[in-house]
């Protein structure tokens, strides 16, 4: 999966918002995070840790037993920062759920602003239905990433 969105600000400014405590709090409230995100800054970038809650009501009943309580922890590591590009990876820890999700962040300078591309790779290790479940998770994840990128655009426009 690959989702992209364009913004009218340079890559570093997008990163500044993605690591801003106020933005992260507002994003968490909007998208139902069970606890606040934390940010760890480093000379080469930043690490954002975000608790996530899968809305269990949206999980098909046949698959609910595989997602446990629906809580997972997402870690975004932005470790490539320049005026032209911000890059990094994201991974999730889903506890005992048989799902792995990971991907990349790429924010590149484009036309006086930037293009933000998020990729995702979803794997579910459940016999017979793993591929179907991975497809459902990928669909949900795509919707969430699009909504979060739109929220980021709203946030940037309001500042």
Image (cartoon, grey):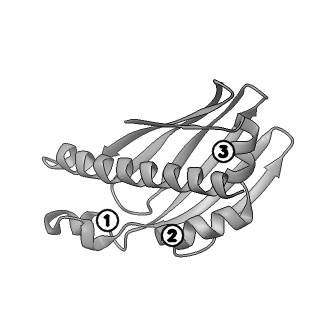
**What residue would you read off at disc 2?**
30
Residue drawn at (51%, 49%) of the image: 149
Residue 9 drawn at (x, y percent): 70, 38
Q: Does residue 43 lie above or below 30 as drawn?
A: above
Q: Can residue 11 be seen here?
A: yes
Disc 1 is placed on an element classified as loop
Visible residue check, residue 125: no
Q: Residue at x 67, y 62 (%)?
A: 23
Give how far apart the Cα atoms at labels 2 and 1 are. 22 Å
Name the secondary structure under disc 2: helix
Image-based side of 151 in relation to 141, left or right: right
Say left or right for 67 vs 73: left
- Which element carries disc 3, helix, strand or loop? strand
The image position of residue 90, as x and y in percent, is 56, 45
- Say which of marks 3 and 2 sits in front: 2
Q: Nearer the viewer, residue 95 or 102?
A: 102
Q: What residue is disc 1 on?
A: 67
Q: Which residue is mark 3?
A: 77
* Whole-number angstrom distance, CA of label 3 to CA of label 2: 22 Å
Report if the CB atoms under discs 1 and 3 are less than 8 Å apart. Answer: no
Q: Position of residue 91 (x, y in %)?
A: 52, 47
Of label 3 and label 2, which has the lower sequence position?
2
Compared across the picture, whether 72 is left or right of 21 comes to: left
Horizontal side of 154 relative to 124 (left or right) equals right
Sequence-first disc among 1 and 3: 1
Indicate whether 88 appears above or below 46: above
Q: Residue 85 or 90: which is nearer the viewer?
A: 85
**Dividing the picture into quarters, in which one does residue 104 lie?**
top right
Q: CA distance from mark 1 to mark 3?
A: 24 Å
């Amino acid at each position: 999966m690959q989702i992209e969105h364009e913004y009218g600000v340079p890559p570093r400014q997008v990163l500044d918002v993605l690591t801003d405590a106020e933005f992260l709090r507002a994003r968490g409230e909007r998208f139902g995070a069970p606890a606040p995100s934390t940010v760890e800054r480093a000379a080469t970038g930043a690490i954002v840790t975000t608790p996530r809650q899968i809305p269990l009501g949206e999980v098909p009943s046949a698959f609910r037993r595989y997602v446990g309580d629906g809580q997972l922890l997402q870690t975004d590591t932005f470790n490539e920062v320049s005026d032209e590009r911000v890059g990094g990876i994201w991974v999730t820890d889903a506890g005992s759920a048989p799902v792995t999700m990971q991907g990349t962040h790429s924010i590149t300078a484009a036309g006086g602003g930037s293009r933000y591309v998020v990729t995702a790779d979803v794997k579910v290790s459940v016999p017979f239905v793993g591929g179907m479940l991975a497809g459902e998770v990928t669909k949900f994840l795509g919707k969430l990433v699009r909504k979060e990128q739109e929220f980021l655009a709203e946030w940037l426009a309001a500042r």
